[in-house]
Image (cartoon, rainbow, N blue to C red):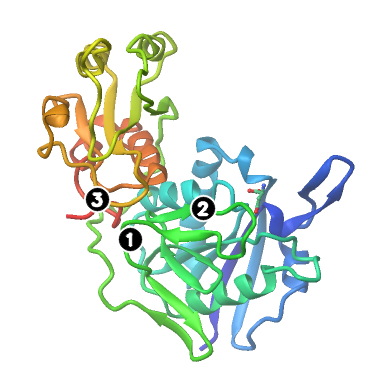
């Protein structure tokens, strides 16, 4: 039987056309479909959800998109989302947490050049995304330049190259070559926290990358501005300075203001480990948690999602639920 997929278009370079002030989204789902060769054995329904450069896609848009995906998965075999590349990894991670297990895949793709450009990577990314939808297990993936990347491990690493996305701190979920789609057999364990859409989210999360000499006073601003969460990219395995400028004490006092901190490493690869060095040993507490080997995108969106329903989701902050952290 033919598979039935839903295409949700959101804008991005893939759908962009030249405007007076540079590229901007100008094509909808129907036009995207008319620019690609479709497999004979699939039926594709489509909907224009947004027409945005992904720099304008924020937590409010993730909620709308999650609702659209959730509804579409009830009646379709999978969902394809076309999306700008700049914040695609954030959206993929956010959707990973918001969507329950529905036994079907969700794939995000986009391109570095508009679909109408002669050298565009859009047609191949689009075709590969459809091919992955036909055979991938339940989950959210980014499909880009022959790679299938778990939604919570995707990072945009390059601004212009076609090979823009990597799977950071976790294996690819699969790849595509001339033999077809090869999906990894042992994908990281997923621990579904619920069977309903879990789309409540609190955008009051701040991301700070430490530099040698960061003043503890910058953190005072967070409480004043109403932030509820902080992702702190610390040094190496998770070190913070405490001589002259005591960041460790400051993080604890943020907790007294009700702010939850997730400490990750500013190294792109591998984990934060607070047991290894003395400078990291007093960091963790009842309000300061280790982000392990989560990517920035996975950590920021997870903290927003946890803060969206603290009572029920706090338990998941330091647990792997969608392949976002190694166990
Ligand atoms: N600025 C674009 C966007 O993220 C970049 C792209 O799609 O490649 O919407």
Give the percent coordinates (x, y) of residue 201. Answer: 41, 35
Ligand 1 has an atom within 8 Å of the beta carbon of the residue at disc 1: no
Give the percent coordinates (x, y) of residue 205. Answer: 40, 27
Question: For the residues carrying marks 2 and 3, which lies nearer the camera in this image?
Answer: 2
Looking at the rendered structure, the secondary structure element under dot 2 is: strand
* Left or right of 214, for residue 82: right
Count neighbours of disc 3 (C-alpha within 10 A) and say few if under 14, some if 14 to 19, many if 20 or more: some
Q: Which of the two labelled residues, at mark 2 and mark 3, occupies the earlier sequence position? A: 2
Q: Is residue 71 above or below residue 134?
A: above
Count neighbours of disc 1 (C-alpha within 10 A) and say few if under 14, some if 14 to 19, many if 20 or more: some
* Left or right of 117, for residue 129: left
For residue 254, which numbered disc appears in the image? none
Q: Is residue 278 above or below residue 71?
A: above
Q: Which residue is mark 1?
A: 101
Q: Is residue 316 above or below residue 85?
A: above
Ligand 1 has an atom within 8 Å of the beta carbon of the residue at disc 2: no
Give the percent coordinates (x, y) of residue 111. Answer: 65, 61
* Residue at the image point whose x is 25% and y is 64% from the top: 188
Q: Which residue is mark 3?
A: 193
For residue 156, which numbered disc appears in the image? 2
Among the 4 quarters of the image, the one containing residue 174: bottom left
């Amino acid at each position: 039987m033919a598979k039935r997929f839903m295409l949700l278009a959101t804008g991005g370079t893939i759908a962009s056309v030249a405007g007076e002030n540079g590229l901007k989204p100008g094509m909808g789902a129907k036009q995207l479909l008319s620019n690609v060769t479709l497999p004979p054995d699939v039926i594709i329904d489509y909907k224009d959800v947004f027409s945005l450069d992904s720099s304008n896609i924020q937590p409010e848009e993730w909620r709308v998109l999650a609702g659209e995906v959730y509804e579409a998965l009830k009646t379709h075999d999978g969902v394809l989302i076309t999306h700008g590349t700049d914040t695609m990894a954030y959206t993929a991670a956010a959707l990973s947490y918001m969507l329950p297990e529905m036994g079907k895949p969700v794939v995000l793709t986009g391109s570095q050049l508009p679909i109408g450009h002669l050298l565009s990577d859009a047609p191949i990314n689009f075709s590969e995304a459809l091919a992955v939808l036909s055979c991938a297990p339940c989950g959210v993936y980014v499909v880009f330049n022959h790679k299938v990347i778990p939604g919570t491990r995707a990072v945009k690493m390059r601004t212009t190259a076609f090979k823009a996305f990597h799977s950071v701190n976790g294996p690819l979920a699969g790849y595509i070559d001339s033999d077809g789609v090869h999906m990894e057999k042992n994908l990281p364990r997923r621990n579904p926290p619920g069977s309903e859409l879990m789309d409540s989210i609190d955008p009051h999360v701040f991301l700070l990358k430490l530099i040698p000499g960061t003043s503890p006073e910058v953190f005072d601003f967070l409480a004043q501005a109403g932030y509820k969460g902080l992702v702190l990219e610390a040094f190496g395995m998770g070190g913070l300075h405490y001589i002259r400028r005591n960041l460790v004490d400051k993080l604890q006092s943020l907790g007294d203001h009700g702010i939850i901190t997730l400490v990750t490493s500013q190294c792109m690869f591998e984990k934060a480990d607070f047991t290894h060095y003395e400078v990291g040993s007093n960091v963790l507490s009842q309000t300061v948690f280790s982000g392990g080997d989560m990517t920035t995108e996975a950590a920021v969106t997870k903290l927003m999602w946890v803060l969206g329903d603290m009572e029920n989701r706090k338990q998941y902050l330091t647990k792997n639920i969608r392949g976002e952290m190694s166990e």
